[in-house]
Image: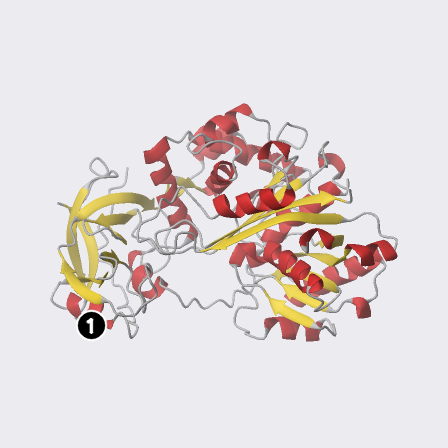
Amino acid sequence: MTPLNDTLSILREPPRPRSFSKAYWDATREKRLIVQYDKRSGKYQFFPRATSIYDGHRDLDWREVSGKGEVFSYTIAYRARPPFQGHEPFVIGLVTLDEGVNVMANIGHCGRDRLKIGLRVKPLWAPLANGTHLLMFEPD
Amino acid sequence: MALHDTACVGYAETKIVEKSDRDVWELGAEILETLLDKTGFEKGEIDGLILSSAMTGAGNCFWSQTTADQLALEVDHCQTVDIGGCSPLGALARAAAAIDAGLCNTVLCLYADTQATENNQRMRSFHNEWTAPFGYIGPPAAFGLLSRRYEHQFGLDYASLGKLAVAQRGHAILNELAVEKFRKPISVDDYLNSRMIADPVRLLDSVMVCDGASGLLVTGRKAAEKKGLSKIVVPIGYGERTNYRAGEAIVDVTESGHYVAGQRAFAQSGLKPTDIASFHPYDDFIIAIMLQLEMLGFCKRGQGCDFINEHDFTHSGDFPLNTGGGQISAGQCGLAGGGTNLVEAVRQLLGEGGKRQVKNTKNALVTGIGGIPYGRNWSSSVVMILTPNA
């Protein structure tokens, strides 16, 4: 079987942040992961939104987290569009951070034999052309 | 009650093709003309137009007005429903509501899209920041994540899913309007051996985007009776849910809004799952059919494969499933694709299923799935139960 591509060599366009997600992307310049936190409900949310998913209020904090978590689910992509086309197969995972949110990302440095739901993972930061970084994961 | 005072007095459907050499409005005109010819209604009697979403129309935020103009329809109610694959059923429910509210009397529900030839969609959502950087191609990857999770929670026998694919393919062979490419038989082995797209999602799990159109002419039951139209189909139960469990950061992807939409539709209709005579679920991926069997209470959660193994899903079997082939074997007409299984249900209830006619036409249950959100299964779930004039 073809080994799984860690996708680190793929040149990705830096995303275009929104007014309410800019802080997230700015923090990734220093490879820091910050997640929105609703102190009224005591819960985190991801991806960043302009409002709390819990009560509809806008007063949200950013909290820095470790980025450690475990694989909730994963799929192995055998078909992709540019710039990923030709780099298949690669892993798209859904990772449950220890803070209780699910984050989608590629999982790198992980062979088929290790890849499974429940696998402990930690951040793997992929540099982007504008100085920000993309949060990916690798086995912890 | 509004819903069951509504009558579908006619249905129409074009041939589904891989790439249409006819414009989306030419397909729309074919639907309009067919409905007028079949029902005896005059164009001027149509005073409502409700469209499904269309990838072809996606660049035009005046889509329903522009389409009304192209078809020269003068209407008192004009809208596009934009809940993705739920739009065709949503359009019928909104037609019933509009007629009941006195906004209009007779509605053309038109489901036309030429996404394969002309996709004008420009997505504004989470994609750019949160999924596109990972090579996520949307639905196949989402259903790959869902399938893997289902397998982890309950176990998943892929041969059972293959059985559904084979049954639907058999129906497409009997459906002259299905896309020609799929009008040949497949086996469970063909399904299992088809190439992986987003492991564990295979090619034969997946819909192929095509071009085509369908539609319904909808009016009040009394108006239909006045015209002497006795061959009608009546919606008797409907449920719709968008953003199921929106206020939760992590959701169980093996559970969908069909759970609540189904409960509402069953309660409104007075029927229960064991009463359902034929099942026409939205099928973008095979596993979606199984999840809906569970969500709608045909079987318990996690027991979808057992249910599949125990039933015969062919048109002559004990649990007829998507008797036109479903979108997976008849072709997905872009965002109008939800109309394919709906129109097939109406056709069956009117006894016009021909070689694939089901025996029991007491009722039919049709569903919709629309939109792929972040880390969940789908955005909108709709369920409708229909009966012939009874």
Where, by quadrant of the figure, is residue B56 drawn?
Answer: bottom right
Q: Position of residue B139 (x, y in %)?
A: 43, 51
Instruction: Please tell me which residue is depicted at 39% across the width and 52% down the height of the picture.
Output: B245
Image-based side of A140 in relation to B52, left or right: left
- Tell me: residue A27, above or below residue B214: below
Image-based side of B138 in relation to B5, left or right: left
- Tell me: residue A78, above or below residue B169: below
Image-based side of B227 in relation to B170, left or right: right
- Crowd around label 1: few <14 · some 14–19 · many ≥20 (10 Å): few
Mark 1 lies on residue: A130
Coloration of the structure image: secondary structure
Q: Is residue A128 visible?
A: no
Q: Secondary structure at mark 1?
A: loop
Q: Nearer the viewer, residue B384 or B12?
A: B384
Image-based side of B382 in relation to B35, left or right: left
Quadrant including the C terminus of chain A: top left
Q: Is residue A44 visible?
A: yes
Q: Position of residue B217 (x, y in %)?
A: 74, 58
